[in-house]
Image (tube, helix red, strand yellow):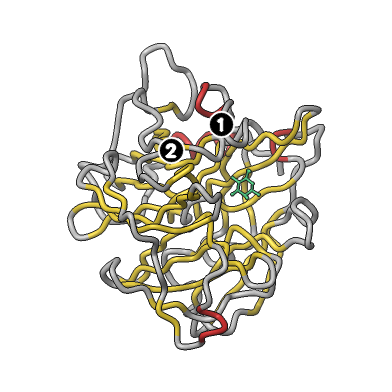
Amino acid sequence: MSKLKIVGQPLPDMPWQDRPKDCKNVMWRYSENPIIPRDLLPTSNSIFNSAVVPFDGAYAGVFRCDDTNRRMVLHVGFSRDGIHWDINPEPLRFECGDSEIGEWVYGYDPRVACIEGRYYVTWCNGYHGPTIGVAWTDDFKTFHQLENAFLPYNRNGVMFPKKINGRFAMLSRPSDTGHTAFGDIFYSESPDLEYWGRHRFVMAPAPFEVSAWQCMKIGAGPIPIETSEGWLLIYHGVLRSCNGYVYAFGSALLDLDTPWKVTHRSGPYLISPREIYELTGDVPNVCFPCAALHDPDTGRLAVYYGCADTVTSLAFGYIPEIVEFTKRTNIL
Ligand code: BMA
């Protein structure tokens, strides 16, 4: 592969730790995991599946903090180094022109995309079942909530970091009223962030015989990263074992101009539960990525992932190696 071009703002000081000498894996875990304990807030039962972005020379984020009523709530947080976080004790409340849409029910699994200098939050928003809430902010203080993007039931709404063919673009995972049926990722576009259409199928779970970690359902993870080999998508996949679900994550490459066309998809996972904080917690055996930071010059990638629906951790890798891995292990 000639030198991979990676798009994004320089982040030379992003969270990073070199690959351990004895590690032969494409991605490796931060030695100080988990970086966010479950009780960082006095009211939190668990803090996981959360979104971070570079902001104002440091980092900001939207965090899933389930409280000790076990309600799913979002909170804003800030960090100088991307590792140590100050999370506002007060829940994030959206401003919304429509009281029916703005009525808070629950929110979880946020993502944050920076598009043309503005930050867009998407999350799993309670409105007669989970659907995709959309809001924007310029300062991480005031958040303006827009219409829900889709009808319920839908989860894992993940925007692209730039308009595609002049329109906002989002991946999502529609489902039925249950927790598992319809495990496929779709792509949608919008001219105005209110009306979403041009829905396209992206990919379905893989056959069990081919790649079992992603055989039951899949969902987009962090905001896709633009490279000269296509959009690099980190996504989670679910295996149904005799002892329940196992959430792992892997990678795919999507065509730059028609991102619903998947060109490569990894057979092996990148990260699957194996450390104690991934294996035990409120929901055992879950590695659930919702955000990533990257530095285009060095190719460094830091993935933030929720562990066992309880705490938040970091895993590292080099984007060129992950792209090469995705192509080498392609199951398509
Ligand atoms: C998914 C989502 C995630 C959660 C996972 C494992 O369906 O609800 O928030 O991490 O299940 O419980």
Residue wearing tag 1: 281
**Other residues around mark 1 within 10 Å, as few (<14) / some (14–19) / many (≥20):** some
Question: Outermost residue, front direction?
Answer: 69
Element assignment for label 1: loop
Q: Where residue 273 sits in the image (x, y, percent)?
A: 58, 28
| Label 1 C-beta lies within 8 Å of the nearest ligand 1 atom | no
- Residue plotted at (37% across, 69% down): 115
Three-letter residue code for mark 1? Gly
Q: Nearer the viewer, residue 310 or 164?
A: 310
Q: Where residue 68 sits in the image (x, y, percent)?
A: 50, 47
Q: Nearer the viewer, residue 223 or 26?
A: 223
Viewed as shown, does residue 106 lie left or right of 239? left
Give the quarter of the figure containing the N terminus.
top left
Q: Where residue 281 sits in the image (x, y, percent)?
A: 56, 31
Q: Kindly indicate the quadrant of the structure image that contains residue 254.
A: bottom right
Three-letter residue code for mark 2? Arg
Q: Kindly indicate the quadrant of the structure image that contains residue 308.
A: top right
**Circle number at residue 244:** none
Circles 2, 1 touching at the beta carbon (< 8 Å): yes
Residue wearing tag 2: 38
Cα–Cα span, label 2 and label 1: 10 Å
Question: Outermost residue, left direction?
Answer: 57
Element assignment for label 2: loop
- Residue plotted at (53% across, 57% down): 108
